[in-house]
Image: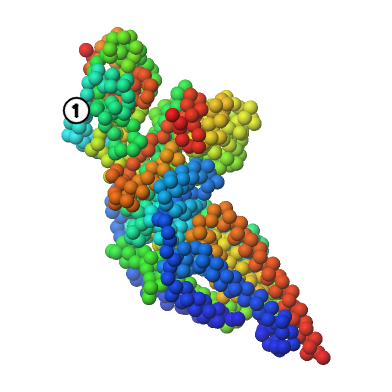
Amino acid sequence: MTAVATNPPGSAGTQGALLLLLKARTFIALILVFAFFAFAAPNFLSTANMVIMSKHVALNAFLAIGMTFVIISGGIDLSVGSIVGLCGMVAGWLVLYGVNPGLGWSIQFNTLEICLIVILVGVAVGAVNGLLVTKLNVAPFIATLGTLYVARGLALLSSDGATFPNLGGNPEYGSASFRLIGAGSFLGIPISIWMLVAVGCLAAYIARRTPLGRFIYAVGGNERGAALSGVKVNRIKMFVYMFSGFCAALVGLIISSQLVAAHPATGETFELNAIAAAVLGGTSMSGGRGRIGGTIVGAFVIGVLSDGLVMMGVSAFWQTVIKGLVIIAAVVVDQAQQRLQARVALQAQAALGK
Amino acid sequence: MNFTRRVLLHSVAFAMACSLPGLASAADLIAIITPSHDNPFFKAEAVGAEARAKELGYDTLVLVHDDDPNKQSEMFDTAIARGAKAIILDNAGADATVAPVQRAKDAGIPSFLIDREIKESGIAVSQIVSNNYQGAQLGAEQFVELMGEEGKYAELLGREADTNAGIRSAGYHDIIDQYPDLEMVTQQSANWSQTEAYGKMETILQAHPDIKGVISGNDTMAMGAWAALEAAGRTDVIVVGFDGSNDVRDSILAGGIKATVLQPAFRQAQLAVEQADQYLRTGETGVDEKQLMDCILITPENAGQLETFALDG
Amino acid sequence: MLRWLCLALILPALAGCKIVPDPDPTAADGSGGGGAQQTDEQRMEARVAADWEETVLPALAQETAAFAEVKPALAAGLDSAGERFGVRPAAGSAPWNFVVSGQGTVVASKLDSRAASMDLDTDGDGAADIRVQLGPIVRGTGLRDALTVYDFTAFRDQIEFAKLARALNDRAVADIAKPEADPAGATYAFTGVITPKAGESPIPLVPVTLEAR
């Protein structure tokens, strides 16, 4: 990436411009999608709709941020959707029943504690993923596929398939503010968006400015090389899966608060949307390459696309086809960019060598 | 282009977007939200509602929530943002639907529920409920009669997380459990799916070859089970379904599946649109919020009149 | 550093949790405040037991029509008969229910079934007109639907409402003395609810009173 940034201008003017265009493709796609729906879908540009769409995008964006780290490190996390469902059920359980050890009393928690416990559950499932991948050497695809089923099964077991209703909380226990996570807003912008901004900035900071972030790229780019140069590969992998679990837990909290109910099937196929957003944002499935900012824009492209199509009343079956085509196109363009970038870099080297 | 610049550009795009006035729509819009159309039952609902709304001069927006409460909630947001005048909904969960319907009400949009009810009254204008419990009792009564009040049977359940799966099963057992000579050898979920029902039925036949009847939570599963029974040469087994789809009608007429229970999906959807129209014009529907619509037992005698979830004549 | 940060966050927060005794220790089932409730069935049974003498019977008495009058009206048309004698919840597609009284001779009976019944001939032509359901299994929700005091909107869901119908039916047949031996030829006077469908004969009746004459 840095090699391109320091590429002397003029040496390959048109190629440079093309490369810039390709690198900004996700963002251009977003603008195009926006412009299209502004004309095609009534009320699309209203402020209320913008806020609503951002809320919808936020859910996928959280998962996609966690997923980006995992993919950059050379893994994959298929379990996020199930973690969303499980965490939602844990939140619902805590709000309704608290923790009851069966001794004639129960511990009731306030909103902050509920959030912390739920996040802990998400991180714990992530840690299980991490342990499976690092200590037991299970391929990430299989390990997280296993936790996908386990977590979903646990979510269904927690209530016997039923929905936890009326998660309004109880003012006596200080959990009445639980609803605010999904319904509250600050300065006219929903809390979930603020959370996304916070998590997004934190993740971008980790990725670009901390040694941890650079190690993640190193592990994904060349695991052996990273290990030989002293990177604690296992620790890095544990971190990415736990962070992904953390993001999924946040989504579980937000959804159960928004719906004021926890449904055990929540989050099915969320992992696929998250992977799609990451790929659309330029994350390479083979690891070592990708950016948080790109992923967030990717999530916006998918979200705006699906919301816009829904507003236009396009058949749900067509929506699925269109989403698939967009993802394929994104990867094709990504490959083109890689080739072009390699060529520009070669030319730059050749120019230097002269 | 780095992250900060993207964010900056993004917020500019947002600011521009926000400053533009929303587009006004011409005819009044009715949003029709149902589960996925890959099940003919929900397709019939959507088609019925859409046709009636068009007749009454409304624009329609047909949306699909795939029985996912979160997606349903997003659909409500979309309907509100599009400025729909009314929402016709077959909901994705009795508890999880309360919040979005309330949100629509707060935004001044009345909701008219069909097929399934929600666990709160006073927030939707109408709830035209398919009496699944009564329907299941009808099916069970017929099943008991066909079984001769005795014998071993299996039950195929719908998806556990679905309200109707529970209601139907409860309705079946409300009747069947009063007959001590009827013994349920197994109860399996086949997730409403034909393929899964086929597989489950094959396994059940291996474990319990002496089975005499199968009662199924819906028609697609009944079809799957019947296919497995036919393949195993066990066409003597009594199968009873639920929904009243055309496939099962044909099977009943051909002497395969013995009975099913019709939910008047088409009529229900149209009734909801009519009530929505009345409400939008006069401010009231003139009927109670919760209305039960009884199901009708379909046997070889009346199966011939059945067409797309409606009984002729 | 991260670990300390987490601890610093968690420790003060834990001070906010509360230990609450279970609402009713005898009924504690591990789910805290959630359990410890009657089932729908029990609640509806209790409700019917409380309402039966005070509201149900008077409400039925008010709607009762002679079956001898209802029968020809039914032959003329279900809807027109419904307008004159029938009750049904709200408008729309709900079927008509009729509270009827009359008497007839037993022409057939089926007592060995769990859904026992006997057929009465009310007009002396030898054909059965009414099929009195004797329980213990009673079909149909006619009794509930004939009672306008029970409004579906006031109930949580269709399960609760169905349990009400079941409780009402059970309560109704509990009072009925089921004939021991073959009752053929005996005369019975009845009051009860019918929900006739077009062309159905004999019409099933949920009996509220049944007396041998």
Task: Name the residue nearer the viewer: A97 or B255.
Answer: B255
x, y percent for residue B313: 43, 29
Q: Amino acid at mark 1?
A: Ala
Task: Name the residue nearer the viewer: A53 or B136.
Answer: A53
Q: Is residue B301 left or right of residue B291?
A: right
Q: Is residue B266 left or right of residue C73?
A: right
Give above or below for A107 relative to C196.
below
Q: Quadrant of residue C48?
A: top left
Q: How is the image coloured?
A: rainbow
Give above or below for C62 relative to C119.
below
At 56% from the left and 75% from the top, the residue drawn is A293
At 46% from the left and 77% from the top, the residue drawn is B15
x, y percent for residue B5: 55, 82
At 47% from the left and 26% from the top, the residue drawn is B302
Q: Quadrant of residue A321?
A: bottom right
At 40% from the left and 60% from the top, the residue drawn is B83
Q: Numbered disc 1: what chain?
A: C
x, y percent for residue C149: 23, 38
| Quarter of the rendering occupied by the N terminus of chain B | bottom right
Q: Is residue B186 visible?
A: no
Q: Around disc 1, counting alpha carbons within 10 Å, would you say few (fewer than 14), some (14 to 19), or many (20 or more)?
A: some
Task: Name the residue nearer the viewer: A138 or A311.
Answer: A311
x, y percent for residue A328: 66, 63
Q: Quadrant of residue C63?
A: top left
Name the residue tied to disc 1: C61
Q: Which type of secondary structure does the marked residue at label 1 adopt?
A: helix
Number of labelled discs? 1
Q: Is residue A321 visible?
A: yes
